[in-house]
Image (spheres, grey):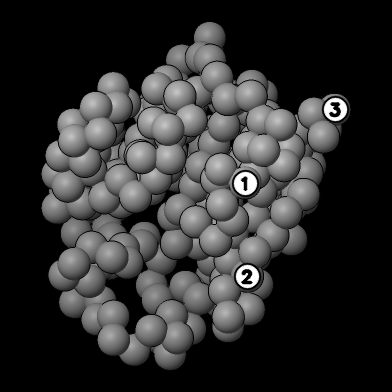
Amino acid sequence: MLLSFNSLIKKYNINITGVIHVGGHIGDELHEYKTNGVENIIIFEPQLHCFEKLSAKAKEVELPAKLVNKALGNKNGRIEMISDPTGLCGSILKPKLHLELSPDVIFSETLDVEISRLDAEIPKNHTYNFLNMDTQGYELEVLKGGIKTLEKIDYVYTEVNQAEVYENNAMIDELDEFLLDYNIERVDTGWHGSQTWGDAFYIKRGLI
């Protein structure tokens, strides 16, 4: 996370009742969730080799999170992902500028994974209010598949792009515009050295 989770909690006096984490990878954020007393968590990770490490990490830190081995988007079914052998970078979108930014990452694997809509996975009476997304440019599709879920979301932490790091990835202004329809606005942004991708934090109006 380019923006410190702990710092955001202090800076914006965040009260988290539950976390939806899309693109959990191998669970790098689990310790931070645990130390901040967040245990109402559901995590989605489609790559099986990453999902197995995520499951082991959750047990290691004794975090009772619900783990789901699926990708999220705006449809239900099966979809193809492109991944490097380590699972460090996996995306539904084909890499573009990423190939220049990280030439050491070789996308040599094709995975057939299950994909679902967020609204199909999260009950209407859910108590999650923090959405964390790291889906390699697929963030807007995740949001489109979760419009009902978004009604109860107060905070969104997401990877953002202002260049085609992946083919046809969503741009940061598109995410800004979409989330504003739910009165959620961007308050913080951190860019990687290349200035092509970064992380952004959004808060529902009235909580700032």
Q: Is residue 183 left or right of residue 179?
A: right
Q: Choose top left, top right, bottom left or bottom right for residue 14.
A: top right
Which is more N-terminal, label 2 or label 3? 2
Q: Is residue 118 visible?
A: no
Label ID, residue 206: 3
Q: Report helix, strand or loop for mark 1.
A: helix
Q: Is residue 86 left or right of residue 123?
A: left
How far is disc 3 from disc 2 in space, using C-alphas? 26 Å
Q: Nearer the viewer, residue 103 or 118?
A: 103
Label ID, residue 191: 2
Q: Are marks 2 and 1 in contact (CB under 8 Å)?
A: no
Which is more N-terminal, label 1 or label 2? 1
Query: Which residue occupies 73% across, 37% down?
Result: 12
In the rendered image, the quadrant that contains the C terminus is: top right
Which is more N-terminal, label 1 or label 3? 1
- Between disc 3 and disc 1, the foreground one is 1
How far is disc 2 from disc 1 in space, using C-alphas? 16 Å
Q: Is residue 118 above or below residue 185?
A: above
Q: Position of residue 175 (x, y in %)?
A: 68, 53
Q: Is residue 2 visible?
A: yes
Under mark 1, the amino acid is Ser
Q: Report helix, strand or loop for mark 3.
A: loop
Q: Read off the residue under disc 1.
A: 7
Q: Position of residue 132 (x, y in %)?
A: 51, 42
Q: Report helix, strand or loop for mark 2.
A: strand
Under mark 3, the amino acid is Gly
Q: Position of residue 101 (x, y in %)?
A: 45, 86
Q: Is residue 104 above or below residue 75?
A: below
Query: Which residue occupies 66% across, 48% down?
Result: 201
